[in-house]
Amino acid sequence: MHETASNISPPALIYLGMGLILARILLDGKNTRGFTWLQWLQFLVDAARIIMLWPLVLFIEKFEAWLRTGADDEVKHDH
């Protein structure tokens, strides 16, 4: 069990923690009282989607900025 815990890097734990906070904020308006099992399943999938995919969105935004910066540098070097 100790081996498994050591395989998770601190940045991954930070991203998961921030994803949990973001999911809590985004899903705060949901009233879970009286949910059926299907509604609970949908709610859990929504929470997991937010937690697991938000770092990908951040990476895509950062990658797009890197590409724009790289293209701007190429234009400057060409002239």
Image (cartoon, rainbow, N blue to C red):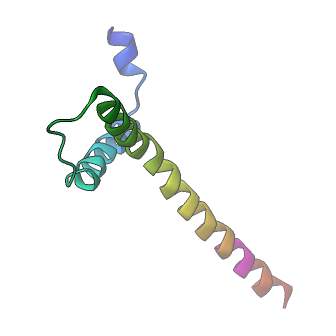
Using the image, determine if residue 74 lies above or below residue 23. Answer: below
Q: Name the residue at 38% across, 37% down.
A: 48
- Residues 9 and 23: in front is 23
Does the magenta run of residues contain 22? no
Q: Is residue 67 above or below residue 29?
A: below
* Picture coordinates of residue 65, whole percent (x, y): 59, 70
Name above or below for residue 62 compared with residue 50.
Answer: below
Answer with left or right where residue 34 lies relative to residue 71.
Answer: left
Using the rendered view, name the quadrant where residue 68 is placed.
bottom right
Considering the image in quadrants, where does the C terminus appear? bottom right
Q: Nearer the viewer, residue 43 or 17?
A: 43
Q: Relative to residue 7, is residue 33 drawn left or right?
A: left
| Segment colored magenta | 69-73
Please provide percent x and percent y for residue 12: 40, 37
Q: Residue at x 61, y 61 (%)?
A: 63
Considering depth in this image, is 29 or 67 the residue closer to the camera? 29
Q: Residue furthest toward the bottom?
A: 79
Q: In the image as oriented, which residue stretches furthest toward the right?
A: 78
Left or right: residue 68 versus residue 49 is: right
Question: Does the magenta stretch mainly form a helix, a strand or a loop?
Answer: helix
Q: Position of residue 13 (x, y in %)?
A: 34, 36
In depth, the one of 11 and 29 nearer the eye is 29
**Residue that sits furthest to the top in the current view:** 1
Q: Residue at x 40, y 32 (%)?
A: 9
Against 9, is 25 above or below?
A: below
Q: Is residue 28 left or right of residue 60?
A: left
Q: Report the quarter where the N terminus lies.
A: top left
Let me know if residue 70 is in the magenta part: yes
